[in-house]
Image: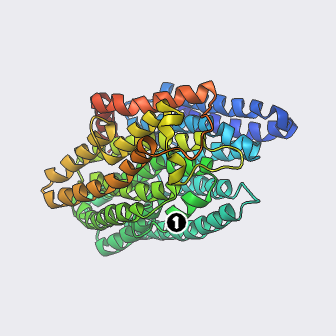
Amino acid sequence: MEYITPLWPAYPEMFLLVMACLILIVDLFISDDNRIFTYGLTQFTLAGCAVLTFFTGNAEPVYTFSGMFVDDLMADALKLMTCLAVITILVYARAYTAARGMFRGEFFTLALFATLGMMVMISANHLLTLYLGLELLSLSLYAMVALQRDSVQATEAAMKYFVLGALASGMLLYGMSMLYGATGTLEITELAQLSAEGVRTQAVLVFGLVFIVAGLGFKLGAVPFHMWVPDVYQGAPTAVTLFIGSAPKFAAFAIVMRLLAQAMGADALVEEWRQMLLIMAVLSLAIGNLAAIMQTNLKRMLAYSTISHMGFLLLGVLSGTLDGYGAGMFYVVVYVLMTLGAFGIILLLSRDGFEAENLDDYKGLNQRSPWYAFLMLLLMFSMAGIPPTVGFYAKLSVLQAVVQIGWWWVAVIAVVFSLIGAFYYLRIVKLMYFDAPQDSAPVTASGDVRALLTVNGLAVLVLGIAPQPLMVLCIEAVRASI
């Protein structure tokens, strides 16, 4: 394979890195009263990165940096969505972080470096590039969780996240080293070619695959590698929880596709990792939904909800088909959209000295603000998979992919646990519409937050009615990349 030398496929990442370093320096000379300038510069950087990603996009895979970096349709789509997600996160988090002394340059630069890590992971065509992006993302997230230094809860969450994250990174790195020992290469396209031809050290390859799947399971938050998710979601500041629970899932999906669907996509190897993903998916659906029922803290409930959603995502991937991969990408896009909206409402209702993270805080929300209650209803319906919201179509497409390979019994299990999960989502709707409010304070929001939340909530409904364009984009992106 011949590789081109031009650097234009990596222009978005270069622009992001230069601007993140510039913002880090400029922020030193800005007073706390003028911190909005740093915020504006950060949003400009993300918007510019999205524009560059769009205009440097390519339908056919383009390789650079000696084959270590790839720009393809899947990478462009995921990077564009990552930038839009981080822009949305910062809009939602502005009032929350300002009220808690977190509206500082450190928060913005860590968010930018985390975004850079995600983009490097998404475009990685080499295991070292992938690991570099993963560590850049992980270290930024550890620091963001601990950013509220006076909070014992946040510090404890950061320590748990760091220790378990280091363990998972070690497993992933060990698995990569075994892949290198078995094949003699770290390049994903060459790994794909060798796995298709069949390598003599098949046993070593499968053994390394076990460690890689374990590391990926941690990054996704799938059972039995889920132990960090509830504690980090609850302990971290809500703005950081929103960041952890949304945009990085795009990068996690990308490395699952690069490592499993692309590098280990040979039929013999698919059978090996399919069995592991099946166990993780079923356990995630069971434990995620059953544990969420018992939660009274909304952030912790959404953490277990995330675990169950990752179970559905893995069902799409383990199908090993193009439709399944497309359904998996569609599911992760829909999941991030729903998570942004749900945590956006939580941030909106939180104010100085008050965290709107308990279920009782949502009693009577319809009486305080019918519109925000309606948006939350749409988001909860979508998470539960109730038509006509997009969550229904996302789950349906994944179940269809599983049924196509003859695993109808897995689809039945997924439907049963999805029905169980509907209980805790509908409980929030019941609290908002049928219980008396505990707080009569009006719900206020700035114009940009109000507009973005409205678009976010209504997108769940519109995409549920007309999901075809997004689904076609996902399938085409996967087809062009795998």
Q: Which residue is mark 1?
A: 228
Secondary structure at numbered mark 1 = helix
> For residue 468, what is the image quadrant?
top left
Horizontal side, residue 104 vs residue 333: left or right:
right
The relative height of residue 158 versus residue 97 in the rendered view (above or below) is below
Residue drawn 60% across the image and 50% down it: 238
> For residue 31, what is the image quadrant?
top right
Q: Position of residue 226 (x, y in %)?
A: 45, 66
Q: Could you tell me the amino acid type at mark 1?
A: Trp
Q: Residues within 10 Å of mark 1 (few under 14, many from 20)?
A: some
Q: Position of residue 181 (x, y in %)?
A: 42, 70
- Residue 133 or 371: which is nearer the viewer? 371
Is the C terminus in the top left, top right, bottom left or bottom right quadrant?
A: top left
The relative height of residue 459 versus residue 324 in the rendered view (above or below) is above
Residue drawn 76% across the image and 30% down it: 37
Is the N terminus in the top left, top right, bottom left or bottom right quadrant?
A: top left
Residue drawn 32% across the image and 72% down it: 201
Q: Position of residue 211 (x, y in %)?
A: 42, 70
Q: Position of residue 30 (x, y in %)?
A: 85, 35
